[in-house]
Image (cartoon, rainbow, N blue to C red):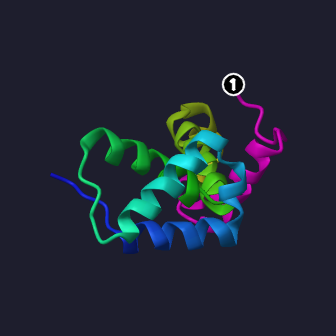
Amino acid sequence: MRSISYADLLTLWKKGSRNGSLQRLSCLKKGLFSAALSYAKLGKNIVNSKLVLFIEDIADLIKNSLRRRIMNCGSERAIRIVQNPKIVDTAPEVRQWVKCDAFVFWLGTSVLTKKSWILVQ
């Protein structure tokens, strides 16, 4: 059985305040998180399974920074590139490029800004 403590919630609250992700939450999610933080401050862990799932979903939204979104998009694009035999046959060094974080970051930014540099279908 999973539980969430006050220290966990406080860490998430501070992180969300610093990176601005708390402002992107809806009023309902922000209120739920604030209520959970107040309840946990009384010294009680949150053990209700549905509530724990809701808070974990909110935690994922809070942890999702811009760099993380860029890297996720870049990783997805890199996988599609490596799986395309036309690209790998044309440029075999692509397999080494996708292992480089800077290249994956560049791919992610190009996906998020809708720039299409690789037009092989």
In the image shown, does 38 or 69 lie closer to the viewer? 38
Give the x, y percent position of residue 73: 62, 46
Q: Which residue is mark 1?
A: 121
In the image shown, does 38 or 85 lie closer to the viewer? 38
Residue reaching furthest left? 1
Q: Residue at x 53, y 62 (%)?
A: 99
User: Does the magenta-highlighted stretch encompass residue 100?
Assistant: yes
Q: Which quadrant holds the C terminus?
A: top right
Q: Is residue 101 left or right of residue 117?
A: left
Please give the count of numbered marks on the rendered protein: 1
Q: Residue at x 48, y 73 (%)?
A: 11
In the image shown, does 21 or 29 lie closer to the viewer? 29
Residue 28 higher or lower than 65, as above or below = above
User: Does the magenta-highlighted stretch encompass residue 113?
Assistant: yes
Give the crowd class for mark 1: few <14, some 14-19, many >=20 residues within 10 Å: few
Q: Residue at x 72, y 63 (%)?
A: 20
Residue 81 higher or lower than 75, as above or below = above
Q: Tag 1, which secondary structure?
A: loop
Give the x, y percent position of residue 58: 50, 49
* Magenta segment: 95-121
Q: Residue at x 45, y 63 (%)?
A: 38
Q: Is residue 24 visible?
A: yes
Quadrant for residue 19, please give it.
bottom right
Quadrant for residue 43, please give it.
bottom left
Give the x, y percent position of residue 112: 76, 44
Give the x, y percent position of residue 81: 59, 40
Q: Is residue 92 visible?
A: no
Q: Which amino acid, by three-letter code, is at mark 1?
A: Gln
Q: Is residue 10 left or right of residue 92?
A: left
